[in-house]
Amino acid sequence: MRPLPPFGTLRRMARAPRPPSSTQYEAIVVAAAAQMAGKAPLPDVEAAAAAAGVPGHVAKALFPSAEHLTIAVMEHALVLLVDAVTVATARAAAGDPVAQIRAMMHAVLDWAFDNVDASRLLLSLPALRFAESAMVERYNTAVYELARQFALKAQDEGRLDAGTDIEELLLTLRALVLGLTTLEAIEQTSVWAGGDDPRKALSAAVDGYVDLRFRPAAARG
């Protein structure tokens, strides 16, 4: 099986230049994210600048086009998501690769519930169109490699069948988390959860799949 591309096929795109004032930069990005959460297909640079209280000429220097601003919005959301995954993984049982994989999956799901607008943006058409920047590629690769190392360690410890295709496993783990977060984003969780609490139901789905694929620590051979 060919190596799995890190969470999608990515290509390098030019990024907007970093601003002389990170506060102005972030304020515009936050305002643009609010526009896009309100179903705007692309943010309006001038409107975002006005909402952020930043002069229009400064905004245009930072974001020459709506495309540049869109990339910045997506990258900002992705940074927050990866930070959440990193923190959750660090808090998992040290030296337990299955606990760390479980923590990574739960972190993505919890972040989607706690950051609904940002999660929907990362699943939106603008995200699919513009999520090919160098930063996105860097973060996707880092997360993919982290999960891969955990899976390989679990396999070495006998908690995963020796013949398991690691790339295929990671693909199914990613597909599961993506599918569950999409269910929540399109507000269909309650339909499929049978009336249960949506967050609890999706969390149980993650645990069920992890328990299905990996052996408990006590069963190490």
Image (spheres, helix red, strand yellow):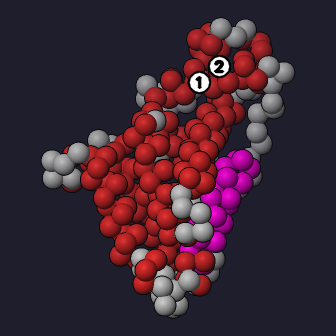
Residue pictured at 32% horizontal, 67% vertical? 208
Q: Are marks 2 and 1 in contact (CB under 8 Å)?
A: yes
- The residue range painted magenta reads 133-152
Q: Secondary structure at mark 2?
A: helix
Residue 56 in sight = yes
Q: Is residue 60 above or below residue 219?
A: above
The label on residue 27 is 2
Where is residue 22, by image quadrant? top right
Residue 32 percent coordinates (x, y): 58, 24
Residue 93 percent coordinates (x, y): 54, 61
Between 62 and 201, the one lying in front of the other is 201
Disc 2 packing (10 Å; few <14; some 14–19; many ≥20): some
Type of amino acid at the residue the image marks with label 2? Ala
Residue pictured at 55% horizontal, 69% vertical? 96
Cα gap from disc 2 to disc 1, whole angstroms: 5 Å
Where is residue 49, by image quadrant? top right
Residue pictured at 60% horizontal, 68% vertical? 95
Residue 51 percent coordinates (x, y): 58, 11
Residue 46 in sight = no
Residue pictured at 46% horizontal, 35% vertical? 115
Between 60 and 96, the one lying in front of the other is 96
- As drawn, the residue found furthest toward the left would be 195
Instruction: Inspect the magenta stretch and tell me whether residue 144 lies in it.
Output: yes
Instruction: Inspect the magenta stretch and tell me whether residue 137 lies in it.
Output: yes
- As drawn, the residue found furthest toward the right would be 20
Q: Secondary structure at mark 1?
A: helix
Residue 24 percent coordinates (x, y): 72, 18
Between 2 and 168, the one lying in front of the other is 168
Type of amino acid at the residue the image marks with label 1? Val
Would you say 215 lies left or right of 190 here?
Answer: right
Q: Which residue is mark 1?
A: 30
Disc 1 packing (10 Å; few <14; some 14–19; many ≥20): some
